Image: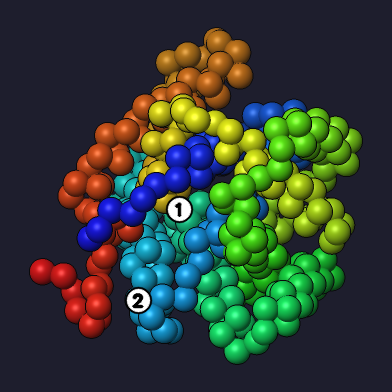
Amino acid sequence: MATKQRIAYIDFMKGFCILLVVAFHIDYTIFSTPYNFMLQQFRVPMYFFLSGLFFKEYNGFFDFSRRKINNIVIPLLFFTLIGVIFNLCCNLFKHNMDFRMALSMFPRNPINANTPIWFLVVLFEINIIYYLLQKFLPRWLTIIAAIILSIVGYVVVQHCDNISIFLYLDIAFVAMPFFILGSESRRLGLLERGPHKAVRIAMVLVTAVLLYFFAGEINMYERRYPSYLSLYIFPAISILTLLFVSQYIKRPVPIISHIGRYSIIVLGTQILLIYPLKYAVIKFFPSINTMWHYLIILVSVVILEYPVIYLLRKYLPRFTAQEEFFHEGWKIKK
């Protein structure tokens, strides 16, 4: 499999966002309310934006589907299985149960055994929907259709609490505009060029002020959103500001960029590290400040992700989107 040319600041952006995701999963109150809301504007929306940046049709729908199965569905199934096994072991040891009793404690949705991978379900749905929209509709109609879908997803959450949506499809509808923002940004050449340095500095200052005073809660998994316009205006401003600022980073921090490059592995394994680390830190350091607990856990997760990434890349690359599971012709690689 040919090595793709990396864009350094994109890996930095992904790494920055995945570290925020890890911090949030350690404890959602790790940041005080105004700062938490500020970070929520791009913590998850940024990932949909970055996925849209690199959207391609490839060689038709079947080739497109094959690649998305390799890059999204196979890791989704793998990390779901790992989560189920991890939870089963926790139930067996923590509650001193037999195998049958421990297995009975699992939720109906196996993805809940490793909750962060809900993102992969939604990302796969968005890719398929967007492919079909832009395949059969002009570009402007595709954008309008995506806005309509986002309104549908938003209204369902706000006014139809008793409706259970299959496989987070409502979240996929709500996230579509972020994905299209990424696709359109690439088409407009924003990856190669951005505004003048002075404009970027002004954008940072204005964005920081806007977010501090006006940003609302955005928690896609919990389906907690601000007003419809705020849901898209402030994240869009935040995402583009972070994009333009990151372009100026000539030498990104290696740790953040490495985590960002393999963010799909971090996404799928972070919970498996966070839970035992939280237990260990609270048990062995009960008297230290809570914020120090969070910091120790976060640093430990980042350190432990290095060997995890190495092992999964080396021994299970086809299950973690590092190599193709299905090559052209839909045959499994030998």
Residue 149, numbered circle: none
Residue highlighted by disc 1? 114
- Residue at left 71%, top 58%? 223
Examine the rendering and report whether any part of residue 219 can be seen: yes
Residue highlighted by disc 2? 66
Question: Can you say whether 254 is above or below 293 in the image?
Answer: below
Determine crowd level at label 1: few under 14, some 14-19, many 20+ residues with C-alpha closer than 10 A: many
Left or right of 72, for residue 334: left
- Residue type of the residue flagged with mark 1: Asn
- Residue at left 66%, top 45%? 194
Q: Position of residue 183 (x, y in %)?
A: 60, 64
Determine crowd level at label 2: few under 14, some 14-19, many 20+ residues with C-alpha closer than 10 A: some
- Residue at left 67%, top 78%? 139
Viewer-proximal residue, 305 or 272? Answer: 305
Left or right of 295, for residue 171: right
Find residue 292 and report its image quarter. top right
Which quadrant does the C terminus fall into?
Answer: bottom left
Question: Can you say whether 142 is above or below 119 in the image?
Answer: below
Does the CB distance between marks 2 and 1 fall below 8 Å?
no
Question: Can you say whether 194 is above or below 125 in the image?
Answer: above
From the viewer's perspective, is the residue at label 2 or at label 1 nearer?
A: 2
Viewer-proximal residue, 79 or 97? Answer: 79
Q: Position of residue 38 (x, y in %)?
A: 75, 38
Q: Position of residue 133 (x, y in %)?
A: 61, 82
Left or right of 117, for residue 209: right
* Mark 2–mark 1 distance (CA, rounded to whole Å): 24 Å
Find residue 196 and report its image quarter. top right
- Residue at left 41%, top 70%? 68
